[in-house]
Image (spheres, rainbow, N blue to C red):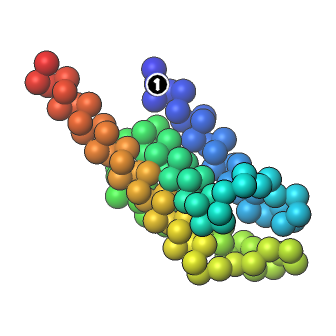
Amino acid sequence: MLQKMLKPASWVMILGLVIVTVVPANERPATGFQHDIEHFLAFALAGLTFGLAYAQSTRVNLLSAFVFTLALELSQIPLATRHARLRDFMVDAAAACLGIVIAHFWRKWIKDQVVTA
C-alpha cells in the first residue's frame, strides 16, 4: 500500500527537481538554507522516496540517480540564468544515491524484522 503511494510521490519529486532546475534563477523557490544543504536535502529526499517506491534493483536506481543528476546539471548549460556546476552535480548525485542506499537498508531491516517476528 505504502509503495503504491510512494510511486507517484517520487515522480512528483522528480518533476519538481526538473522544474526548479530549468526555471530562471530568480523564479526558483528559496528555502533559506545554504545552497549545498538545499540541494542535498532535496535530492536525498527524492532518492529516498524513489528508492522506497522502486525496490526492484538498487543498482539500477543508483545508476539512474547518477544519470538523472548529470542530465539535470547539463540541462542548465544553454540556460541564460542558470549555471551547470560540477560541485552541484557531485552534491546532488551523492545525496540521491545516499537516499537510495538508506531506502535499500530500510527495506532490508524491515524484511529482517518480519522474518524474526
Asked if residue 6 is positioned above or below residue 16 in the image, the reply reads: above
Q: Is residue 55 left or right of residue 90?
A: left
Inspect this view and state whether residue 101 appears: yes
Q: Which residue is mark 1?
A: 2
Q: For the point 32% across and 46% down, which residue is it?
A: 104
- Image position of 98 (left or right of 117): right
Establish if 35 lies above or below 58: below
- Residue at image coords 50%, 66%: 93
Q: Is residue 55 above or below residue 72?
A: above
| Residue type, label 1 | Leu
Q: Nearer the viewer, residue 99 or 37?
A: 37
Can I make out residue 68 in this image?
Answer: no
Give coordinates of residue 2: x percent, y percent: 46, 24
> Residue 103 lies in what quarter of the image?
top left
**Helix, strand or loop at disc 1?**
helix
Q: Please say if 86 is above or below 40.
A: below
Question: Could you tell me which residue is drawn at 53 percent across and 47 percent down?
Answer: 45
* Viewport quadrant of the N terminus: top left
Q: Residue furthest left?
A: 116
Residue situated in front as seen by the camera: 110 or 62: 110
Q: Quadrant of residue 59?
A: bottom left
Give left or right: position of 4 versus 62: right
Q: State how many labels appear.
A: 1
Image location (x, y in percent) of residue 41 = 56, 53
**Where is residue 50 drawn, in percent x and y?**
49, 45
- The crowding category of the residue bearing disc 1, from other C-alpha atoms within 10 Å (few below 14, some 14 to 19, many at least 20), is few
Q: Residue at x 72, y 72 (%)?
A: 75
> If the image is split into quadrants, where does the C terminus sit?
top left
